[in-house]
Amino acid sequence: MSPNTPYLELREDIATANASRMLATAAGLKVSLRPHVKTHKTVHGALIQTGGKKEGIIVSTLGEARFFAENGFDDIIYAVPVIENKIPTLLKVHASIKLFTVIVDCKQAAQVLFDAKDLPEDKPWNVQVMVDCGYGRDGVDPEAESTLDLVKALNDHKATRFMGIYTHAGHSYGAKDKCELIKIGEKERDTVVALASKIKTYLSVECGSVSVGSTPTCSVPVSNLEGVTEMHAGNYFSYDTMQMAVGSCAEADIATCVVTSVMSHNHASNFVLVDMGWTAYSLQGVQFPDLFGRILGHPELRVTKCKQECGLVSRVDGKPIDFSKYPIGMQLRVLPYHACATAAMHRSMWIPSQQKKEPIASGLWE
């Protein structure tokens, strides 16, 4: 028996195929794959992404870090810059597993790590430096002298162990086509490889990890990743219509959807009312009507508006709806514009009954 609508549905066969394809891509490029687990936040999903291993993942919230550490995962990267008020929780996770790595992109963040109280003398922080490869959100300037100063400080201080460099080509989500994705991926690679060489030349320090990635640049990869040790991505587990638009995937590769039920017919205003609002779908992407609210198997329909607890479904061409085709109680499956945002609206994912009968518990969400 399925849960009450609206709920998040996962096609495990599609997600598994997506994960296997990404593992094969990494192997073909002779790098390791470090999956980001923020899309689903589940042990089950992480094991699918890693090929069954409880190690080598990325998280971006303290809740995720705690949850996966408590569930036996090791070699976890917390991939957002550290700040002082998170140190107590980070210390607990750091102490609970063999390898927990944090990220910094400025000297102030490094100083927070240097000054942390209760850090075991025999277990310094494992630290990677975030590098800006063109995204412009976070990360050090790879050309700046201050970047070498930061690496030297981390390498020299007894409280930190410099592990390498990490970059994220988040701007790839705005690529217009696959050619642009390749160019972004090449710059992403070239930026960190050049910086790793500079660090070795000027500081005589090796970058144990040189990490690149985003779902678009990993789904449409460059021809080689020479000089890179690992690639990271997360959204590929389920994909979405945004990824479809940039060329990362086809609609058939989208593994999640929100299942919603028809509640009412509004003949006067020509729309079908469903029980999925923004609290079940999110409003990200609403400005892109061709991608937002696409309904699986019904290309003639779109969710055109989302209220808090309900949504309005209209015909794409604006013609009168034949309401007999969409009876009260009928279930519709709405593809996410951004799978990470949609998944964050839910506490669990439901596997269709022909695959599994029980939902996957989501763990702790923060």
Image (cartoon, rainbow, N blue to C red):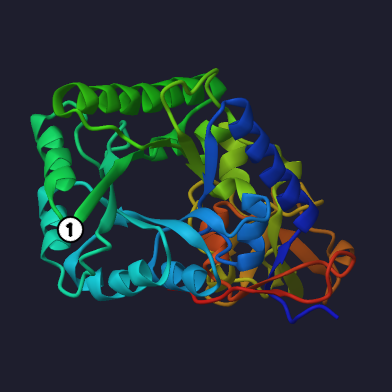
Q: Please tell me how crowded label 1 is: few (under 14), some (14-19), or many (20+) other residues with Cα within 10 Å.
A: many
Say which residue appears at 74% left-offset and 82% top-offset. 4
Q: Is residue 117 above or below residue 300?
A: below
Look at mark 1 in the image and give the residue it sits on: 159
Quadrant occupied by the C terminus = bottom left
Judge whether residue 27 can be spotted in this image.
Answer: yes
Find residue 82 and report its horizontal and vertical position in percent. 24, 59
**Residue 320: x percent and y percent?**
77, 55
Question: On screen, 43 above or below 248?
Answer: below
Q: Residue furthest front?
A: 122
Q: Is residue 286 left or right of residue 164?
A: right
Q: How many marks overall?
A: 1
Q: Is residue 305 left or right of residue 274?
A: left
Which quadrant of the structure image shows residue 111? Answer: bottom left
Helix, strand or loop at mark 1: loop
Expressed as whole percent of the image width and height from the top left, the position of residue 60 reads 40, 59
Where residue 349 sits in the image (x, y, percent)? 67, 69
Quadrant of image for the N terminus:
bottom right
Identify which residue, 285 or 170, lies in the foreground. 170
Give whichever of 351, 316 is nearer the camera: 351
Res 114 quadrant in image: bottom left
Residue 137 seen from this side: no
Quick check: 305 above or below 63?
Answer: above
Residue at 34% across, 67% down? 94
Above or below, 188 relative to 166: above
Q: Going 69% across and 48% down the picture, which residue do you hit?
A: 254
- Mark 1 is on which residue type? Ala
**Image quarter for residue 262?**
bottom right
Q: Residue at x 85, y 59 (%)?
A: 322
Horizontal relation, residue 44 to residue 282: left or right = right
